[in-house]
Amino acid sequence: MKGILARLKNEILIYDGALGTVLQETGALKAGACPEELNISNPKVIKKIHRDYINAGADIIETNSFGASKIKLAAYGLEKDADRINYEAARIARSAASGCVSRKIYVAGSVGPLDRQVTPLGDLSFDEAVKAFEDQIRKLKEGGCDLIILETFADIKELKAAVIAAKEIGGIPVQAQMTFEGGERSTYGTTPAAFAVLMNSLGAEIIGTNCSTGPKELIRAVKEISASTDGFISCQPNAGLPELRNGKTCFPETPKAFAKYAVTFAGLGVNVIGGCCGTTPEHIKEIRSALSGNKPAKRRYIPAFRLSSRTKVVELGAKTRPLIIGERINPTGKKDLQEEIKQGKNIIIRREAIEQTRKGADILDVNVGVPGTREQDTIGPAVEAVQGVSEAPISIDSANPFAVEAALKEVAGKPLINSVNGEKDKIDSILPLAKKYGAAVLVLALDNRGIPKDAKARIKIAEGVIRKAIALGIRKEDIIVDPLTLAISAKPDQAGETLKAIKGLKKKGFPSSLGVSNVSFGLPNRRKINADFFGLALAFGLDLAIINPSDDNMFWVAKQKKKRAVTDAGIKKFLGDALSPAAEASKKGLSASCEGAAAKDVRTRLKEAVLYGDKDNISGYVEEALAQGIAPLEINSKILIPALEIVGRKFGKREYFLPQVILSAESVQRAFGRLKKEIKPGEQEDKGTIVIATVEGDIHDIGKNIVISVLENHGYKIYDLGRGVTADVIIKEAVRKKADIIGLSALMTTTMIQMERVIKELKKKGLNFKTIVGGAVVTEAFAKEIGASAYARDAIEAVNIVKSLMKERS
Amino acid sequence: MKNIPIKIPSDLVLSRLKFAKYKTRADKKILSFIAGIIDEGYSLIEPKAVFAVFDISVRCGTVRFGSSKFAVKSASLSKHLKGASKAALFACTIGGELVDRVNAYVKKGEIASATVLDAVGSEAAEALADRIDDIVAKNARAEGFSTVTRFSPGYGDWTVFDQGKLLNALKASKIGIKATKSYIMVPEKSVTACIGLVKSGSKPVRKVYEGNISKAKK
């Protein structure tokens, strides 16, 4: 008898409808009971539902095992019975299917999501998830299933684990389905296209969607899936969106209306149609009669190099060429990144991912190879970190198969493996991983004898690897060849061979990629040479480029559609330009803005440096003012402080916001730093001394630091006691430093009570320090209640209040 | 959940820094300075969260969360959860790296960078809480529930003294959140909250199995 896949080429097969909702109607399922347990305690009722669907016209029936993974059954204390429940689920369906003599009925082993989420969404490791799915699928297969249906998944990574498990068990077709809210995205952001690209690559034979919404909303999802796979497509919608009528959940789509949509789906090329929640044998009967004699419509699928992340697909096409692979997540020559990787941190990696994506990188290369570290331990967290901040698909850059596999497990999409080459051990270790995890591969045109000198030999090596990849089941469009760039400073003739190899590969239908910047190694003016070579390589047909996305020159070249001569003369001209002594860049004089600044009087410049927070230049201006003979105290009291006061007023009017005030304060700080050397002790006016602290129990001190910075610049002597300071210490220090004022800060309702304690202690000890309080939760009323001298809302208010408190003291 | 993608809303960062839309005159230089710090923020945050849904009972101003020992005595929370049969508790954090960098800036005397980065951290934590809120709501919808706005310790009469117990109920130490003796969460930029789930009729439901499993957990 024909296998299901052979039949799907020419026929539309009809799935059954809901099992759960129908089961509830029978009354056999008690509230709170496990539906799958009925496979053991009441197999008759399950078989009856299967038979009803077969009689209604279903060609494929689903086993009662959606929630029968060990992990999920554990919620009922049934994990020990998992094997039996799954095996029996298949046996019951098989037995119902054999009862039908008029036509072949297929049994699909139903597998739903586990009850625990896979990392990073949950704490279940990828390997644990694969194992849980394998256990379930093995038993379903042993029980006699014809195919496995993985359905209602919301997390693409969990579904990836399930497909890999099904493929590892092997021997039966896999149908993979996700559920899309409103037909647009899964709960965790995956689009139907991103889902289909990965499933296609993992080798799921039937790809589709079920549940979540009614048929109308799923039309869009089906169209998107259809464009991203050449596999068979399935669709099992709910019977509309459920409504609550008289306290009962009802699905509004009638069997007839539902069947109309089935015809629409058939027109879109869907090969397998059925129903999910709320559908009944009646719905299936109507679908059968509506689709009688229908053949699946022909679909148009264009094979292309495609990668995906959890939420996005990147495709190589006329409009997107060249795709840019960001090269900066690579510790070679970067000490800070090497150090971070050693420490198990990913801050720089995340920053590089963000910046490269912002600059326009389509794909992010991840390389964490640092001597003295285990790459297989560090690459997974690095991939996770990149995926957390960027939608760009990932290129796994490692020669170590263990590291490659560790990374493949973490990727929530279809990555590129960078790279495999003509060496036997690389072919044997890397290609099977690409097949298993659904990755594309980049083939380096070299083998154990090194890089061949001429283009033809490089293409030959690449073709050898490609043949082996295709034999393993990797698609031709998932293979990219890197014909390798060599430094022209050492081997100038090699640039031509690389370019010719690109052209040769193009002719044979293989996309190419280059690490472009190697070309200029050891030469001056590298950016120019890189850009020039990049332009030439694009003209020869380059499709992908591994570059530094921060190099705007390269992006400019990528966007130029300028035609360049694809000839030997073109190559010769490039080499001539690149290898001729670099013309020295013309040295421009001061820029117009600098000249403008120089034209202004130094007092104005100093004032403006404060007003605009120009902390980089202010020290220079102070130097200049001193050289002109302006007295240090005059600079301070006649220029800097008045400028700060303007800043304060602007803040009061909200013309300035907080960062401007602080930058001004920081600028003045720098100026003071220089002036201090000139001002003799005693010359500086004593404006007052303040001891300031964040109170005991509180760890927040950013507000306190702003206040300190501003007060200091207004000439007050500040002693910062830090945060979490006890009342005793604050008082002791205030006495020791002969303070005029004690400043107290707190951010929490739980810690602001400590302010009261300080004030009470002061009173008890008969100390008459002025006190000023502030912090997010502190209010004027609270300040009064605890007997503080004053409350300040912000740093600028604090300056004015401190001024008046000092007056009161004198 | 780890590495949850979030978007730091730059407009909210600006308003946290007292930017007034029609009054403040900020030049390009200061705005690009802030944009740079926001980028830095993205590289420093490690959004992590835990959440769990409980069947709840509300009696005499006390909310009890399923079979866990966690209970909250709060009239405001009780009122807020009116009509809800379940509630999700969550704890989320952007991790400690950002705050460490803020402190490093303070040490170097770069208070402007510290202040802006601190504001970025606060907004990132809020954005993360919104994202978790969203995930809880989506999951709830799939089960036929709608959600009410989130409510955190410190709101109304729900005391922050419950912070530690809430974190324990969620085993939040798994994602590195602890409460200090003064009930402050460490890492600093962390949020805890409770979201009520109300049974609704007009929302899609996931397969009946899911519903039964949650019933079985009662």
Image (cartoon, coloured by chain):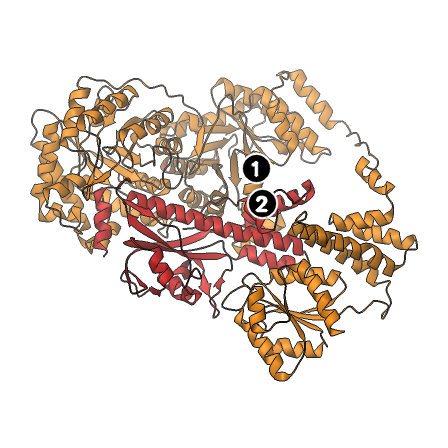
Chain colours: A orange, B red
Residue A535 position, x and y percent, is 63, 24
Of residues B92 and B45, the one drawn nearer to the viewer in this rendering: B92
Q: Secondary structure at mark 1?
A: helix
> What is the chain letter for disc 1?
A
Q: Which residue is mark 2?
A: B39
Q: Secondary structure at mark 2?
A: helix
Residue A677 position, x and y percent, is 84, 63
**Residue lying farthest right?**
A629
**Residue A370 shows in this picture:** no
Residue A717 position, x and y percent, is 74, 68
Taking A809 as reference, is A312 left or right? left
In which quarter of the view is residue A640 placed?
bottom right
In this rendering, the answer to whether A752 lies above or below A133 is below
Residue A184 within the segment the image draws in magenta: yes
Q: Residues within 10 Å of mark 1 (few under 14, many from 20)?
A: some
> What is the chain letter for disc 2?
B
Q: Could you tell me which residue is drawn at 87 percent across and 46 percent down?
A: A601
Mark 2 → mark 1, Cα distance in angstroms: 10 Å
Q: Could you tell me which residue is drawn at 61 percent across and 72 percent down?
A: A788
**Residue A480 shows in this picture:** yes
The residue segment tinted magenta is A181-186
In which quarter of the view is residue B176 placed?
bottom left
Q: Could you tell me which residue is drawn at 9 percent across and 49 percent down?
A: A41
Task: Identify the main secondary structure in magenta.
Answer: loop
Instruction: Look at the image and tell me in which quarter the C terminus of chain A lies.
Output: bottom right
Q: Could you tell me which residue is drawn at 64 percent across and 34 percent down?
A: A551
Amino acid at the residue labelled 2 = Asp
- CB under 8 Å between discs 2 and 1: yes
Q: Which residue is mark 1?
A: A358
Amino acid at the residue labelled 1 = Arg
Residue A593 position, x and y percent, is 80, 38
